[in-house]
Amino acid sequence: MAWDFSTEPEWQEKLDWVQRFCDDEVEPLGHIFPHAARLPDPKVRELVRSLQQQVKDQGLWALFLDEELGGPGLGQLKLALLNEILGRYPAAPQLFGAAAPDTGNIEMLAAYGTEEQKERWMVPLLNQEMFSAYSMTEPQGGSDPNLFTTSAMRDGDEWVINGEKWFTSAGRVADILFVMCTNGMFVVPRETPGVEIMPEPRTHNHIKYTDVRVPLDHLLGPEDGAKVLAQKRLGGGRIHHAMRTIAQCKLAFDMMCERALSRESHGNIIAEHQMVQQKIAESYASINMLRLYVLETAWKIDNTSTQETRTDIAAVKFTMARVLREVSFNALHIHGALGTTDLTPLQAMYAAAPTMGIADGVDEVHTATVARRVLKGYTPHEGYWPTEYLPAKREQAWAKFEPKFAADPELRKTAEGWRGYFEKRSRT
Ligand SMILES: Cc1cc2nc3c(=O)[nH]c(=O)nc-3n(C[C@H](O)[C@H](O)[C@H](O)COP(=O)(O)OP(=O)(O)OC[C@H]3O[C@@H](n4cnc5c(N)ncnc54)[C@H](O)[C@@H]3O)c2cc1C
């Protein structure tokens, strides 16, 4: 029987280890040293390295790379089951060697880098000896890549890059920047003269590139290949975000249920009020629908390709953003005033929920992609009436039954009775 929703026992054992490790080690580290993996303090680095070693010993390091890109070939379905645990703990992706934006940049290097480029950048990124950022969006427009103007001009044995980028996450602390130009994707060391990081925004940086010179071998992939490389990067990233979003929704849901059973109002515990029950039930159903959709999409990627699964990846992208907004709101609301403070994870989760509908492409663009791609499977009907127009369907059925009626007049009489009924009903 192919429709099986169970996890194979060996992988379940690994997942159980991951859950224990995250509860016992990752969560406490995150509470004491947020962003621990990026801190230069040697003592913190030692702590981080020792946890990362445990992950490596379990064979769970950097599992996001496909087999054809030199990764372990775990597959998206298993990765989804892993990520729906990791997504609950902000420190986990770094400790498992699978944190954005490095993951997407590593995927581009793995797919399009020369051996030398892989050696120079991909290996240190995988080992977290180096960190990267991705510079695509520009101040004048993000959703439409045709509005981007940053470009590279060849000058002797160098490329000279000019332009302005905006919302480059962690650009300020990156060692290398992957800069999407109109004529290719370039790797730019942050320290290169002409790279100017503006003071605001602090986390997602505004960067000016003025006469930035890089050697010819800093072009990644073919000239004019930037859009293809960007798709490679973002396709995988979107489904990985969705996997981790399930974990966030589940955290909000667990908190919502615990709180609903713990407080009283107007003579009942609040879980007994029907409007609270509605929020719980709807959140439960939404999370399960999202989870099944993410897992099915991951399964489709494993059995076809990212390219062939584009419609579902886009649909998952805006669905996860909506479910996170709804569920984090419900959880925050059920916590009353406490939910509005920064004393639980809920306020930050709800405040960040809208970013899921913007990062990696705004909801509207993905929604339009889904509709456009789905519609390719349909054709307009001919004439005035849709294919499912019932009188026409009945006439076709009548023609099909004609030989049976010819052989059995009693059957025809019964059918005529029904036809009379339908004709009378359609007149009223
Ligand atoms: C948390 C976060 C991290 C990010 N990290 C990075 C990063 O590391 N590197 C990077 O390069 N970028 C990054 N981005 C930027 C992101 O890629 C852009 O925000 C996104 O592409 C949208 O571009 P924009 O913000 O300019 O919005 P706009 O393109 O100006 O869109 C604004 C609004 O206009 C409407 N709209 C736009 N297009 C359409 C359409 N076709 N149909 C209908 N309505 C439309 C929508 O309502 C949309 O929300 C990040 C964004 C966020 C929120």
Image (spheres, rainbow, N blue to C red):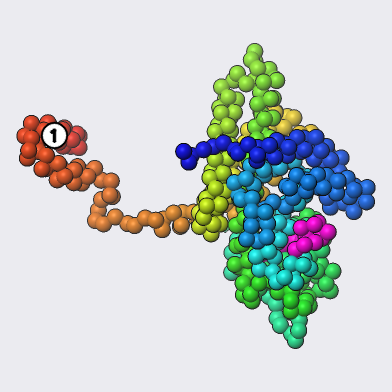
Residue 284 place in picture, x, y as percent = 58, 32
Question: Residue at point 69% right, 25% down?
Answer: 259
Q: Nearer the viewer, residue 297 or 423?
A: 297
Judge left or right: residue 49 versus residue 391: right
Camera sees residue 363: yes
Q: Quadrant of the C terminus?
A: top left
User: Ligand 1 sits in which quadrant?
Assistant: bottom right
Q: Quadrant of residue 204?
A: bottom right
Q: In terms of secondary structure, where does tag 1 sit?
A: helix
Residue at screen point 59% across, 69% down: 146
Using a 10 Å C-alpha cutoff, classify the residue at mark 1 as few (fewer than 14 neighbours), some (14 to 19) or many (20 or more): some
Height in image: 6 above or below 372? above
Q: Report if residue 137 is visible in the image.
A: no
Q: Residue furthest top?
A: 267
Q: Residue at x 58, y 24 (%)?
A: 277
- Relative horizontal placement of residue 209, taking residue 39 as reference (left or right): left
Q: Amino acid at mark 1?
A: Ala
Q: Position of residue 267 (x, y in %)?
A: 64, 13
Q: Which residue is mark 1?
A: 415
Report x, y in % for residue 371: 46, 54
Q: Magenta span has 127?
A: yes
**Residue closest to the far front:** 10
User: Which quadrant of the figure has residue 231?
Assistant: bottom right
For residue 378, above or below residue 332:
below
How far from the left and from the top, in percent, is residue 44? Answer: 90, 47
Q: Decide: is 283 above or below 226.
A: above
Q: Residue furthest bottom?
A: 156
- Highlighted magenta segment, given as a residue range: 122-139
Q: Is residue 130 magenta?
A: yes
Residue 32 vertical placement versus 185 (above, below): above
